[in-house]
Amino acid sequence: MKKNLFFITCIRNIFPKSIYKNIFVRSFGKILFSFLLFSLSPVLLSIDVQGHITEDTSWSPANNPYIVVDNIFVDANITLTILPGTVVKFNTSTYPIGDYEYGDGYTEAKFMKVSGKLIAEGTAQDSIIFTKNCEETDRRWGVIIFDYLSEDDSILKHCKIEYSYYIRLMFGGSWYWGGVSLSNAQVTISNCSFKNFKYGIHGFYDSEPIIYCNYFTSDENNISPGIGIYIEENIGVMPYIFYNQFTNCSGIYFYEVNISSITSIAYNTFSNCNFGISIDSPVYIYKNICLGCSEAIDTDYFEVVIKQNYIDSCLNGISAGFKVEAYENIITNGNSGISLSGDNCIIKNNIISNNSYRGIRNFDNNSSIMNNLIINNEGEGIYASGSDNTSYIINNIIAGSEKGIMADASCNVYNNIFYNIVDYSICIYSSQVTVTAGNNCFTAPNFYTFPSNFIDLGGNITDDPLLIDPLNGDYHLSELSPCIDTGIEDTTGLFLPVYDLDFLYRIWDGDNNSISIIDMGCYEFGSQPLMGGIEGYVTLNSNYNFLPFTEIDVDGTIAFPDTTGYYEMKLLPGIYELHAYLEGYEEVIIPDIEIFEGIFTEINFELEALVSAEDFQLPVFDFQLSNYPNPFNPYTTISFELNTENTERTELTIYNLKGQKVIQLLNDQLSAGKHSIYWNGMDSNNKPVATGIYFYKLYAGKETAIKKMLLLK
């Protein structure tokens, strides 16, 4: 009989050695407990655990706490289920220098490695706790590792993960820095709290974690706080990171991530963090909140879209080392609002206010800064620098700064309002640069320096712009403003937004002379709503995935619903097509949506799950549907059986994880009996599909069956 490597020792801690005994468990991995019954109460019980788990196993709070005295390995095709209220304590090593490397087959700090499946689902009332088995502040345990063999439906929910550090499995090998570490793995992590970590979650080598509604924090004053979520070396997969909270730590860090398509970071909150979001990959940063961080959003190496984020009291708001497009963000009460080093950046319809250093710095790039309200920033509203830089500064209101624009690089300045500027509206810092300006309203004591470097295109005025109530934050034009209909008449080539900061028509006949001319500043006087849009609710026919992960794409405009399913998208008048994607659900396509000026059209829709009845208990038919081999590369055979009641037209279709149709393999009327269909891994355009999970859906008669398969190249 083969000895099982998973040992349990029952220890009754309050009694002398004479009245407890250690039980070493054998026989096919089944865990047998012998108890000594005592009339004394209460009885404190702890269970020592170690080694390989070779059969499906459950841990229960009835046996709390579980003490990990040596490393735990959940073997391939094995499930460890941890029930609500269970406490797991790991033996530790000294921190920060200790024994965390497993190259010799031993570590003092213990870890858990999952090659099968881990189901750790607590509840809001009864969390599952993973922590250290000591009280000393200078000791830490290792991590929980999910490797490439682990099953993609492992779950951590309502867990508390505390005082983890790192593990290295072999000399010269990878470092697993996260309390939860993933190597080419997919795990769903939700409603968990991470405290006092090196990294809370660490994913690399094409890991695809689904991370939502978690809390990350540090409360150790003498130890540098760690990073909540760290993703690196991911190629071609998209982690999902929504609705998480980060406090007194660092937030989300993407390092050397080359994602084949844009992933999204949305609805997260960062408070008192070293940084909120630091990334070097193509990411859509949407509706996050950063409060009191050193760096709110820092980007490099890839194009990034930053939209509708709120940044308050952060040292630096947005720092971009590569091209960035920033729309409709609010950045206030910090040091520096936006710093740009990437080429061809677009900064539109933002509010940047009350920063102690400057509003925007544009360094060495050709960027467009349009339709922004840039107010009460102490140094400069905009600082343009760099020898290769030409900034296009158009239709902004710049107010309440020492200088409006500090020009250490060439600038084209049109249709702006400079109000309550202490020193210069435009300060040309170097005789080597040129500022070209037309149709601006200057109210500072001085317009510019180096007059020979200032090219006046005409239309500039020095009148009071007569804003409605700037002292109380209302910078709209009053009806007597000289800035109405006094912008550049021919805006061809300026690539202006077609709407103002209030989403009204950008070019409007504000003085009622039957000629529509753009106003100066970021607001258009007397204009009417231009932007209509769509709004509505998304629903799911199962709870297989997290609703806010639904990506709603309307001709390139992207939004995500909130936790209730509500979404809203502002759109110009026109005809649109809506696409909605959610992993594991069939793509929704709604064509011919007509949008009218100032009117929101209600579009509600439901997503249908592409998951199997076996895995998720959906009401679908069976047909003995299967495929072999699975996983496969690149060929597989899909088999099914029809009876006499479902021999009407039969369809067999392949979908990807987004629910998009890859190819239809069958659309025909078949006889009753067994059938097999061969798939060569090609899509409908005869191109090979990528590695990943695919769904195959069989429809026959009035019944449907759906199964998953995995292509591994």
Image (cartoon, rainbow, N blue to C red):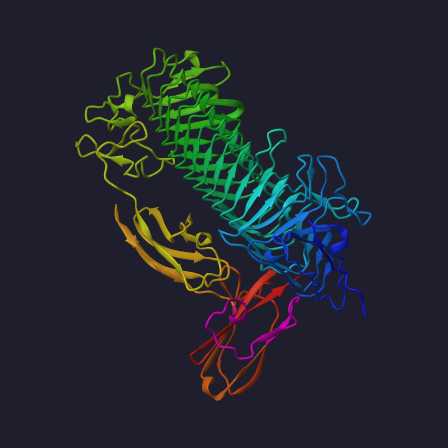
Q: Position of residue 631 (x, y in %)?
A: 65, 67
The vertical placement of 240 against 701, above or below, is above
At horizontal 57% and vertical 58% (from top left) the residue drawn is 83
Relative horizontal placement of residue 63, taking residue 69 as reference (left or right): left
Relative horizontal placement of residue 305, taking residue 676 as reference (left or right): left
Q: Quadrant of the C terminus?
A: bottom right
In this view of the protein, can residue 676 be seen by the observer? yes
**389 or 91, nearer to the observer:** 91
At horizontal 62% and vertical 50% (from top left) the residue drawn is 235
Q: Position of residue 373 (x, y in %)?
A: 36, 28
The outermost residue toward the front is 39
The vertical placement of 639 against 395, above or below, is below
In this view of the protein, can residue 595 be seen by the observer? no
At horizontal 23% and vertical 36% (from top left) the residue drawn is 527
Q: Quadrant of the N terminus?
A: bottom right
**21 or 409, nearer to the observer:** 21
480 drawn magenta: no
Residue 580 lies in what quarter of the image?
bottom left
Q: Position of residue 80 (x, y in %)?
A: 64, 60
Q: Which residues are magenta?
A: 612-638
At horizontal 37% and vertical 13% (from top left) the residue drawn is 422
Q: Position of residue 30 (x, y in %)?
A: 71, 67
The vertical placement of 484 against 141, above or below, is above
Instruction: Report the magenta stretch's main SS.
Output: loop
